[in-house]
């Protein structure tokens, strides 16, 4: 057996292996035994077929190929341990010859990371201030959520809810597909229809009809309607006016579940809003901090890591779309790209993610940011019972990393 290990650029190691037949003998025996379990030969029990009989049945090349598949990971693992290589992703293996056996593996190893000047990085939290206008807007939105609608016998105005029948026709009076609806609900002024449509309804009463022409926008989502002039016929079926609840103690108790005076409720809204905005500000500053850590991180790593990260990102996208009832194929059709095109686009973001991970981990090591097991267990208690099937080892690892990251942020965010 001849094994050569050579360092390559971009934190990679090349492992070249040449095997004599004698080196492969034990693997050939294992391969033959495994294959014999799947082969049926009259007069022999599965797994008990003699080697020479098996060779005649399946051919020596099949046994040899399986033996090589067994030998390669074993030899690579032994070599990695012997050379004390910190391999951080699955090596890429290329079989050069099967007789004699020659193969080479490119293994990504942990890179040298420089974060010079990281200790000078600081970000400062901005003071969060809440205005009376913001509080009023939130309370107004809450009141609108509990709006009740009352049918009225008058002309529709903006802010009213109406139900209309409508249909669109071309210049020859032919009904256009996709432009017809009955009892279609609209709140006038929300501009959910094409520009000008809702304005034509303002001033109409129940059972009144109207005809008018509108031109669809040039950027309309349906290409066949872009810039198209359409004649609409509408009939108003219902007009309702909004009844927004008054802000009083009864309403406050209904939405909050407790008796409060208006001043107390306003104060609680202000406190909640301030906490939310402070949380958002903290997220912004943490993202700013990560960008600054990225700027000081210098690291060169294997393309294998980048490719794996891109695959992970694609997998996340597919999973997210499936969860929302969408398909990845339809998404690609919509953006007019192939999966390979998308992978090329994601490469830059993948490099950024990996660089940042290496940089943050290096800074954590230099800062000696540690988390004790008791702290992890305490976090798990706060989270309550874990869902069935959760890998506790992985869960603890994620929690530990989250706690370390929080601790690191606390040191650098003023």
Image (cartoon, rainbow, N blue to C red):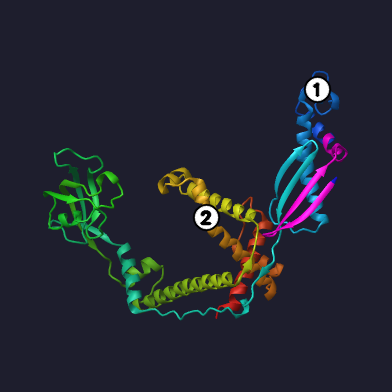
Residue 26 on the magenta segment: yes
Could you tell me if residue 45 is visible in this image? Answer: no
Region in magenta: 2-28
Q: What is the C-alpha distance between the residues marked 1 and 2?
A: 50 Å
Q: Quadrant of the N terminus?
A: top right
Provide residue 171's location: percent of width, then percent of height. 14, 42
- Pick the front one: 321 or 293: 293
Would you say 387 lies left or right of 141 here?
A: right
Residue 84 falls within the magenta-colored stretch: no
Viewer-side residue, 99 vs 281: 99
- Rendered residue at 62%/51% (across/down): 388
Residue sitting at 42 percent across and 49 percent down? Answer: 335
Q: Quadrant of the C terminus?
A: bottom right
Crowding around mark 2 (Cα neighbors within 10 Å: few <14, some 14 to 19, many 20+) is: some
The residue indicated by pointer 1 is: 56
For marks 1 and 2 on the same chain, the one whose residue lies earlier in the sequence: 1
Relative to the observer, which residue lies in front, 318 or 337?
337
Q: Quadrant of the rendered structure where residue 29 is?
A: top right
Residue located beneath label 2 in the image: 346
Rendered position, 227 above or below 260: above
Q: Quadrant of the rendered structure where residue 157 is?
A: bottom left
Secondary structure, mark 1, is: helix
């Amino acid at each position: 057996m001849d094994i050569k290990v050579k360092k390559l650029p971009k934190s990679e190691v090349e492992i070249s292996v040449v095997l004599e037949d004698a080196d492969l003998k034990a693997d050939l025996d294992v391969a033959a035994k495994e294959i014999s379990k799947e082969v049926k030969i009259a007069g022999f029990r599965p797994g008990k077929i003699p080697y020479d009989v098996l060779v005649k049945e399946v051919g020596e090349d099949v046994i040899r190929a399986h033996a090589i598949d067994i030998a390669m990971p074993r030899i690579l693992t032994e070599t990695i341990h012997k050379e004390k290589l910190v391999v951080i992703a699955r090596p890429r293996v290329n079989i050069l010859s099967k007789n004699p056996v020659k193969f080479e593996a490119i293994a990504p190893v942990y890179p040298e990371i420089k974060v010079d000047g990281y200790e000078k990085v600081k970000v400062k939290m901005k003071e969060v201030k809440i205005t009376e206008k913001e509080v009023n807007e939130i309370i107004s939105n809450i009141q609108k959520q509990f709006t009740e609608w009352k049918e009225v016998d008058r002309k529709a105005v903006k802010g009213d809810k109406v139900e209309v029948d409508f249909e669109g026709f071309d210049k020859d009076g032919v009904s256009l597909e996709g432009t017809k609806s009955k009892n279609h609900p609209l709140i006038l002024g929300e501009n959910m229809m094409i520009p000008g449509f809702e304005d034509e309804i303002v001033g109409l009463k129940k059972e009144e009809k109207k005809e008018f022409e509108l031109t669809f926008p040039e950027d309309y989502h349906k290409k066949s309607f872009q810039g198209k002039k359409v004649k609409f016929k509408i009939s108003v079926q219902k007009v309702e006016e909004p009844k927004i609840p008054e802000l009083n103690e009864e309403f406050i108790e209904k939405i909050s579940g407790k008796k409060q005076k208006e001043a107390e409720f306003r104060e609680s809204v202000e406190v909640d809003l301030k906490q939310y905005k402070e949380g958002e500000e903290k997220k912004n500053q943490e993202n700013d901090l990560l960008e600054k850590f990225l700027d000081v991180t210098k690291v060169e790593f294997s393309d294998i890591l980048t490719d794996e990260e891109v695959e992970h990102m694609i997998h996340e996208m597919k999973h997210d779309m499936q969860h929302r009832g969408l398909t990845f194929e339809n998404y690609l059709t919509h953006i007019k790209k192939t999966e390979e095109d998308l992978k090329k686009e994601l490469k830059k973001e993948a490099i950024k993610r990996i660089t940042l991970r290496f940089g943050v981990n290096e800074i954590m090591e230099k800062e000696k940011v540690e988390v004790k097991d008791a702290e992890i267990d305490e976090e798990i208690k706060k989270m309550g019972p874990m869902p069935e099937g959760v890998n506790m080892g992985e869960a603890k690892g994620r929690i530990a990393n989250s706690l370390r990251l929080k601790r690191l942020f606390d040191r650098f965010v003023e």
